[in-house]
């Protein structure tokens, strides 16, 4: 004797999930801290022998100081002196030298004839 077994899915109900969200406005209050920087260009016309370092005055990290960043440029000094290096002496010299060359010379002739039948 043999037995046959089969399975079958039987739906006997459904499940539905619904989710809803509501919104409402609410006022919140807090104190925010912010930082900003002020940049000031301080003109200097001071000669220095070497590149100055970036420096701090009055503790910039603590909030009441200044960070100073030097900006330099090179200036070229030109000293101009006149020095006589040499002189160029130029003279006119005339010479007579014999010259001979073979050239082609063109020459045209004209022949005019009249035919008088009178």
Image (cartoon, rainbow, N blue to C red):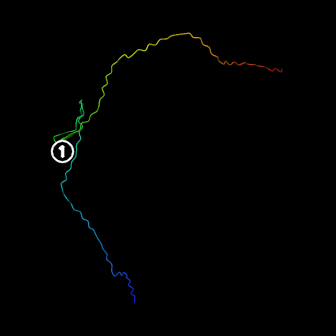
**Residue 108 position within the rendered picture, expressed as x and y whole percent measured from the top left:** 71, 19
Task: Return the residue nearer the eye: 76 or 114.
Answer: 76
Q: Picture quarter containing residue 102?
A: top right
Q: Residue furthest bottom?
A: 1
Within-10-Å neighbours for mark 1: few <14, some 14–19, many 20+: few
Q: Residue furthest right?
A: 118
Q: Picture quarter containing residue 37?
A: top left
Task: Return the residue nearer the eye: 21 or 88.
Answer: 88
Q: Picture quarter containing residue 19?
A: bottom left
Residue 34 is left or right of residue 9, and the answer is: left
In this figure, which residue is indicated by the disc labeled 1? 61
Task: Please give the name of the residue rendered at 18% of the width and 44% of the height, measured from the top-left corner.
Answer: 61
Residue 95 is left or right of residue 16, and the answer is: right
Number of numbered tags placed on the structure image? 1
Residue 99 is left or right of residue 67, and the answer is: right
Residue 88 is left or right of residue 22, and the answer is: right
Q: Is residue 78 above or below residue 40?
A: above
Which quadrant of the rendered structure holds the C terminus? Answer: top right
**Residue 52 position within the rendered picture, expressed as x and y whole percent measured from the top left:** 23, 35
**Residue 111 position within the rendered picture, expressed as x and y whole percent measured from the top left:** 75, 19
Which quadrant of the rendered structure holds the N terminus? Answer: bottom left
Task: Return the residue nearer the eye: 36 or 113.
Answer: 36
**Residue 42 position within the rendered picture, expressed as x and y whole percent measured from the top left:** 23, 36
Q: Is residue 30 above or below residue 19?
A: above
């Amino acid at each position: 004797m043999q037995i046959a077994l089969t399975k079958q899915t039987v739906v006997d109900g459904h499940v539905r999930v619904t989710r809803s969200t509501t919104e409402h406005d609410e006022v919140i209050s807090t104190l925010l801290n912010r930082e900003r920087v002020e940049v000031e260009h301080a003109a200097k016309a001071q000669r220095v022998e070497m590149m100055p370092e970036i420096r701090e005055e009055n503790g910039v990290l603590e909030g009441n100081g200044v960070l100073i960043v030097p900006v330099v440029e090179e200036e070229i000094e030109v000293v101009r002196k006149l020095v006589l290096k040499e002189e160029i002496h130029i003279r006119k010299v005339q010479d007579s030298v014999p010259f001979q060359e073979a050239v082609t010379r063109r020459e045209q002739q004209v022949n005019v004839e009249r035919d008088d039948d009178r």
